[in-house]
Image (cartoon, rainbow, N blue to C red):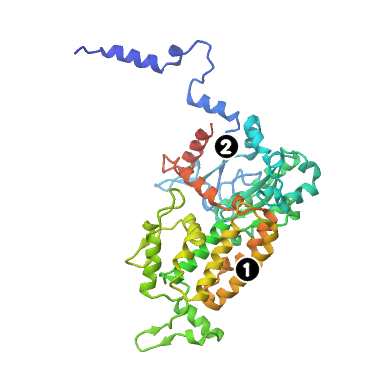
């Protein structure tokens, strides 16, 4: 066997990795990764890094905060502190990666195919009197009527903002996003049609006032949309947890029974205090062990189409009599399709019918094509269903999320189909972004760079 000299291997390796040896002399290929990234920024693929406070109070942005070295609220240092206790000057304790929206719009309109899709709502949608897109909703038409010049141009866009109710508020609290939205309005390019909240809107009240700086914000029919995905999840979680009497999830507890005593209602459900233990009389929704096994066995044997939902069998515990590990989409499938079949033979008729009516309500609410003439009946049905459920379940069952169901039909009427506003696409996209993480010490850096590479 002949051996290749080491010197020859070095020459071959150098030739394959040298641009000057394998490409024509006057080529325009970047010489290194840094030059390639500079070229891509001209396509609208750039980001801005802002220093933030460690507790996500505010951003180091603006004439006052840009030069400060500590947080005005919590008084923590702007710079990173090493293990030896020394402050690392010019090394920010936390960095926020921000992708500007205006360059993104420019990039979308540079491609003819993408530009055609951007004006689909004005040129290609069907006009049969039913709502199948947000452009068929009164909120969309309200913008067109108040600003005819804006509505007459198909390239002008309406934006929807999704906020998880947590650290995503950092942009809103510092008016960073409002600045860009005002700039879009001045250029007659974009307006915000409404906001979607992941937490039901409770934690958004303190930041909603900043959006009134936008000229059109006060004219919106609905300024804050409820997230149907999380409403479904919490409603289904309450029902399943109470029926199966799951620990920490059941709304039927000693405290809820004592609430009935304080309110002077349902004396037959009052707890009976004994010498060694307190006995809770069975309620209409109380299931025996055999009935719980019947429900769980039905779910265990369910066979769903591939990709329709996760394998429900893996979430069923026949030993502990509970469901665990369910995702938001699993609750969606469970509430709209599976639950009504599992409870047909194990609950009293009034309880069974009320829960099934609730399942049908969410099924009708999430239709892709909305018949406006049927919304009045849908609103009356959900009110009647809630009244029936109040006769069955204890007051602890009716938390804020349960009462928010009353407003969902109104938002459907004013803002269009639900699937354009819920958080399912964003939750799936978050999973994709997490897959970009290569350096767990700096996950934000990995996500930003990975997203730019996939967008090329």
Farthest residue toward the bottom? 275
Q: Secondary structure at mark 1?
A: helix
Q: Is residue 215 visible?
A: no
**Of residues 332 and 341, which is closer to you in this image?**
341
Answer few, some or many: residues within 10 Å of disc 1's Cα (few below 14, many 20 plus, some between 14 and 19). some
Q: Position of residue 362 (x, y in %)?
A: 57, 61
Q: Is residue 85 above or below residue 255?
A: above
Mark 2 in CB contact with mark 1 (< 8 angstroms)? no
Farthest residue toward the left? 1
The quarter of the rendered structure image containing the N terminus is top left
Q: Position of residue 258 (x, y in %)?
A: 49, 82
Checking the image for residue 381, the label placed there is: 1
Residue at x 66%, y 65% (from the top left corner) = 377
Q: Is residue 291 above or below residue 78?
A: below
Could you tell whether 340 is left or right of 11 in the image? Answer: right
**Of residues 434 and 352, which is closer to you in this image?**
352
Farthest residue toward the top? 25
Q: Position of residue 66 (x, y in %)?
A: 61, 43
Residue at x 63%, y 51% (from the top left corner) = 172
Q: Secondary structure at mark 2?
A: loop
State the CA–CA distance, disc 2 to disc 1.
Answer: 48 Å
Please tell me in which quadrant of the rendered image residue 374 appears.
Answer: bottom right
Nearer the observer, disc 2 or disc 1? 1
Q: Position of residue 413 (x, y in %)?
A: 69, 58
Please tell me in which quadrant of the rendered image residue 246 appears.
Answer: bottom left
Residue at x 52%, y 85% (from the top left corner) = 266
Q: Is residue 299 visible?
A: yes
Residue holding disc 2:
47
């Amino acid at each position: 066997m002949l051996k290749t000299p080491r010197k020859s291997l070095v020459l071959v390796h150098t030739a394959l990795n040298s641009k000057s040896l394998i490409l024509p002399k006057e080529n325009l290929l970047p010489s290194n990764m840094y030059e390639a990234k500079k070229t891509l920024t001209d396509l609208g693929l750039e980001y801005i890094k802002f220093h933030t406070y460690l507790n996500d109070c505010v951003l180091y942005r603006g004439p006052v905060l840009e030069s400060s070295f500590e947080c005005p609220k919590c008084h923590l240092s702007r710079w990173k502190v090493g293990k030896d206790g020394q402050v690392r000057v010019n090394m920010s304790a936390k960095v926020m990666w921000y992708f500007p929206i205006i360059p993104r719009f420019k990039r979308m309109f540079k491609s003819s195919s993408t530009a055609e899709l951007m004006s689909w709502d004005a040129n290609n949608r069907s006009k049969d009197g039913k709502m199948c897109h947000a452009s068929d909703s009164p909120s969309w038409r309200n913008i067109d009527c108040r600003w005819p010049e804006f509505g007459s141009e198909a390239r002008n866009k309406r934006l929807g903002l999704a906020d998880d109710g947590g650290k995503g508020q950092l942009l809103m609290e510092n008016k960073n996003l409002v600045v860009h939205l005002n700039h879009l309005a001045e250029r007659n390019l974009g307006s915000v049609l409404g906001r979607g909240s992941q937490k039901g809107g409770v934690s958004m009240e303190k930041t909603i006032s900043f959006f009134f700086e936008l000229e059109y914000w006060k004219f919106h029919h609905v300024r804050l949309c409820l997230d149907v995905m999380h409403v479904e999840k919490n409603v289904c979680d309450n029902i399943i947890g109470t029926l199966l009497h799951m620990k920490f999830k059941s709304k039927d507890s000693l405290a809820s029974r004592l609430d009935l005593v304080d309110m002077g209602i349902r004396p037959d459900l009052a707890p009976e205090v004994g010498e060694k233990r307190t006995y809770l009389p069975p309620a209409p929704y109380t299931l025996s062990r055999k009935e719980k096994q019947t429900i769980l066995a039905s779910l265990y044997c369910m066979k769903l189409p591939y990709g329709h939902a996760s394998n429900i069998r893996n979430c069923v515990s026949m030993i502990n009599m509970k469901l665990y590990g369910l995702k938001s989409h699993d609750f969606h499938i469970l509430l709209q399709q599976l639950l009504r079949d599992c409870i047909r033979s194990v609950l009293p008729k009034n309880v069974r019918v009320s829960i099934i009516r609730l399942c049908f309500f969410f099924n009708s609410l999430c239709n892709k094509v909305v018949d406006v003439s049927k919304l009045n009946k849908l609103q009356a049905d959900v009110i009647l269903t809630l009244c029936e459920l109040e006769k069955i379940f204890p007051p602890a069952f009716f938390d804020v999320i349960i009462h928010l169901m009353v407003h969902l039909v109104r938002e459907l009427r004013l803002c269009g189909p639900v699937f354009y506003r819920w958080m399912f696409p964003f939750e799936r996209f978050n999973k994709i972004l997490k897959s970009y993480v290569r350096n767990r010490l700096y996950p934000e850096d990995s996500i930003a760079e990975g997203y730019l590479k996939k967008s090329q």
